[in-house]
Image (spheres, rainbow, N blue to C red):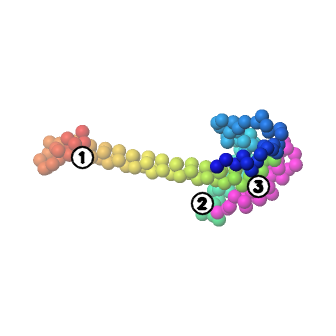
């Protein structure tokens, strides 16, 4: 349907936007949030504080929420001097704290899974060594099936 009869004369609300054209691709990744994001490692003090609090929650203690952690961090990191180890500028946001906890828990789960796999492999190797030793001792013996097991293992 043609709407030109309703708007006989085009009106420009913002004259400065006359020559503006939208960007063709990638405009979403160039927003203000992308420009404000800083990828900085935590300081040693921040890391120790987060690790201690996360360990308290995962080792049978009371689980602490990120907003409570943020408040405790504000109480500890309250020096006005920006060069101080406990400067107020080093207080992390609740999102940063939550991501840190998530990352620490993921690493902890991966290490636990790796330990289980290593233990299973050690047990399997010990079992294979036992079977190999047992088969070597019974190779020429008259027991039925002993030679077949030795042939399978070796």
Mark 1 neighbour density, 10 Å: few (under 14) some (14–19) many (20 or more): some
Q: CA distance from mark 2 to mark 1?
A: 43 Å
Residue nearest the viewer, comparing 99 with 3: 3
Say whether disc 3 or disc 1 marks the residue closer to the N-terminus: 3
Q: How far from the left and from the top, in percent, is residue 77? A: 80, 52
Checking the image for residue 134, the label placed there is 1
Whether 85 is among the magenta residues is yes
Residue that appears at 51% across and 51% down: 112
Mark 2 neighbour density, 10 Å: few (under 14) some (14–19) many (20 or more): few
Quadrant location, the C terminus: top left
What is the span of residues highlighted in magenta in the rendered image? 63-88
Checking the image for residue 59, the label placed there is 2
Q: How far from the left and from the top, in percent, is residue 76? A: 79, 55
Q: CA distance from mark 3 to mark 1?
A: 61 Å
Whether 108 is among the magenta residues is no
Q: Which residue is mark 3?
A: 73
Which residue in the rendered view is the most extreme toward the bottom?
Answer: 62
């Amino acid at each position: 349907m043609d709407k030109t009869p309703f708007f006989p004369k085009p009106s420009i609300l913002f004259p400065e936007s006359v020559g503006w054209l939208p960007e063709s691709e990638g405009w979403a990744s160039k927003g203000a949030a992308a420009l404000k994001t800083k990828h900085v490692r935590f300081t040693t003090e921040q890391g120790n504080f987060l690790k201690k609090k996360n360990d308290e929650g995962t080792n049978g203690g009371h689980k602490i929420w990120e907003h409570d952690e943020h408040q405790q961090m504000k109480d500890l990191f309250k020096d006005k001097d920006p060069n101080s180890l406990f400067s107020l500028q080093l207080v992390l946001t609740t999102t940063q704290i939550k991501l840190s906890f998530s990352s620490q828990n993921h690493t902890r789960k991966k290490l636990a899974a790796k330990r289980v796999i290593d233990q299973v492999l050690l047990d399997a190797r010990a079992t294979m060594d036992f079977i190999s030793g047992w088969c070597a001792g019974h190779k020429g013996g008259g027991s039925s099936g002993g030679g077949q097991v030795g042939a399978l293992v070796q």
